Image: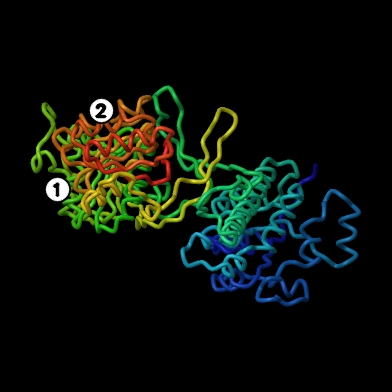
Amino acid sequence: MAGVRIKRALISVHDKTNVERLGRGLTRLGVEILSTGGTARLLTDAGVDVTLVEQATGAPEMLDGRVKTLHPVIHAAILADRQNPAHVQQLADHGIEPIDLVVCNLYPFESVVAQPDCSFEDAIENIDIGGPAMVRAAAKNHRSVLIVCTSHDYPLLLDHLERNDCVIDADDPIRLTLAHHAFNLVWLYNRAISRYLFGELLRKRGAIEPPEVESADDVLPPELDIFLARKQKLRYGENPHQAGGLYLSGAPVAGTIANARQIGGMGMSFINYLDAHAALELVRDLGQLGCPSAAVIVKHASPCGAAVGDDPVEAYRRAYLSDPVAAMGGILAINTPVDVRLAEAVVDSYANWGKAAGAGGFLLHVWVAPAFDDQAVKLITERKAWGKDVRLLAVGPIAADFEQTHLDVKPLGQAVLVQTVDAQPISGESWQVVTRREPTDAEMVDLRFAWLVCKHVKSNAIVIAKGQALAGAGAGQTSRVMSCRIAAELAGERVKGAVAASDAYFPFPDGPAALAKAGVTAIVQPGGSKGDQATIDFCNEHDVAMVFTGTRHFLH
């Protein structure tokens, strides 16, 4: 097929990154430029000759800019097939000059609705209409019209035009490549709008946090598309023989691991990401307790240390002392910025608070925090024993009331399981004391802490806590009694007078019996077993307070 000379371009972009450089490059190649609004002003200020779209159409921008390029003169110029003589003749009959290149990107819908103060009206105004129409039109007619919708492709475009004297063959692969980028952009854009509107529909129904899900139709969309864009390659997956990568389902959200700014260290590994996410989600949940500081240490996706307190150093100290053996080589998440005082305390954990028998130097592979000050970064990264092995992830504010996506997707071979996220806040209003003895005020504070931590421990999960610090956790056991025994063994002497949480009900009294024998004085659990009464009777006989939450927190 014959080539098409690029003589006339339409540039209308919201993201104006490098658009002046593009405009000057096209002008140098003799390409006439049409443009709109702010893009035209920017190009003119940069010394680029521009013809306004309204001059070409004879119609002004209308409706606060909602109508700019939606005009037959523009869309006929884009959609005419240059290999079709009838199309070419119709353009001539109506005095329409073809457009050979469209440069267009869209209103930033995703970033706008991600802002916590975004109103529904703001969201609607950021639904682009003219942009997607032009992008689709040019991509449909890509054998006659080049479509560029990201500034990353500007150098590729200019280089290709220069090397080919602005004549691009109809079957040149660059045309299909750019058309693919364009349709992908529009699809993702429409997908983001659809997701937002479905979320608004749920809010209007009051179904985001239903007290009880009556039907999947109430909160789950009838169709679910999952598009993942690779953000980065990883060295490998869970094991060296597995390939791995980090993929995003949309724009990164502030306060998440995917949006973190990494300071220092080698690239994050597959397991680093899993552990860092687990640590961040638990430290975020601990913010519900109202304490100024919370610290969590995670190993193999399970918390081995967790505590809250009035001071970040104290919160970290108590989290570290939950299990100094497991803390070595773990992942730390803390909900306050890291200053040099906290950094010194952490790197000198062994010197400050003792170490596990036979251990050498202390190391945490990943730190997750809202921010790190310069002195803290210098102290951590220049520590000889740490060097390139430590990665600092600045995620921004870690809000306890963070509103994440309401769907949780788990792979199942060539299928996926979908559920709403386990985001139920801890209120205590539905908690019911079922034993004769009520928990003391101190026990109730610890029960709330243990219940939050238990939510983040693999089932069957048992958590023992004391003084709002993790003392021991039994995770991932096929026997709930074995989880009780493991948690008690890890807690050691701290189990005396401690409390315990179970993520699901006890079917028999054997679990509470193991905990009471070790020294636990109060237990929180969902309740709901046919054997509840036997468990309550046991606790009454042994002066153990027990609370039912009515909520289960399985984590598989």
Observer-nearest of 530 and 342:
530
Q: Residues within 10 Å of mark 2 (few under 14, many from 20)?
A: some
Residue shown at the point (89%, 52%) measured from the top left: 85
Q: Is residue 495 left or right of residue 152?
A: left
Q: Residue furthest top?
A: 241
> What's the distance in space between the residues labelled 1 and 2, CA to CA?
32 Å
* Residue 520, horizontal then vertical, whole percent: 21, 38
Name the quadrant containing residue 223.
Answer: top right
How many numbered tags mark residues here? 2
Q: Is residue 295 visible?
A: no
The residue that disc 2 covers is 485
Name the quadrant containing residue 381.
Answer: top left
Observer-nearest of 449 and 538:
538
SS label for mark 2: helix
Q: Residues at badges 1 and 2 in contact (C-beta under 8 Å)? A: no
* Residue 524, horizontal then vertical, whole percent: 32, 43
Q: Is residue 18 left or right of residue 440?
A: right
Observer-nearest of 259 and 454:
454
Q: Is residue 167 left or right of residue 93?
A: left
Amino acid type shown at disc 1: Ala
* Residue 420, horizontal then vertical, whole percent: 52, 46
Seen in the picture, residue 273 relative to 14 is either above or below; the reply is above
Q: Earlier in the sequence, mark 1 or mark 2?
A: 1
Residue shown at the point (35%, 25%) measured from the top left: 479
Amino acid type shown at disc 2: Arg
The residue that disc 1 covers is 345
Seen in the picture, residue 119 relative to 18 is either above or below; the reply is below
Q: Is residue 336 visible?
A: yes
* Residue 547, horizontal then vertical, whole percent: 33, 45
- 1 vs 2, front mark: 2
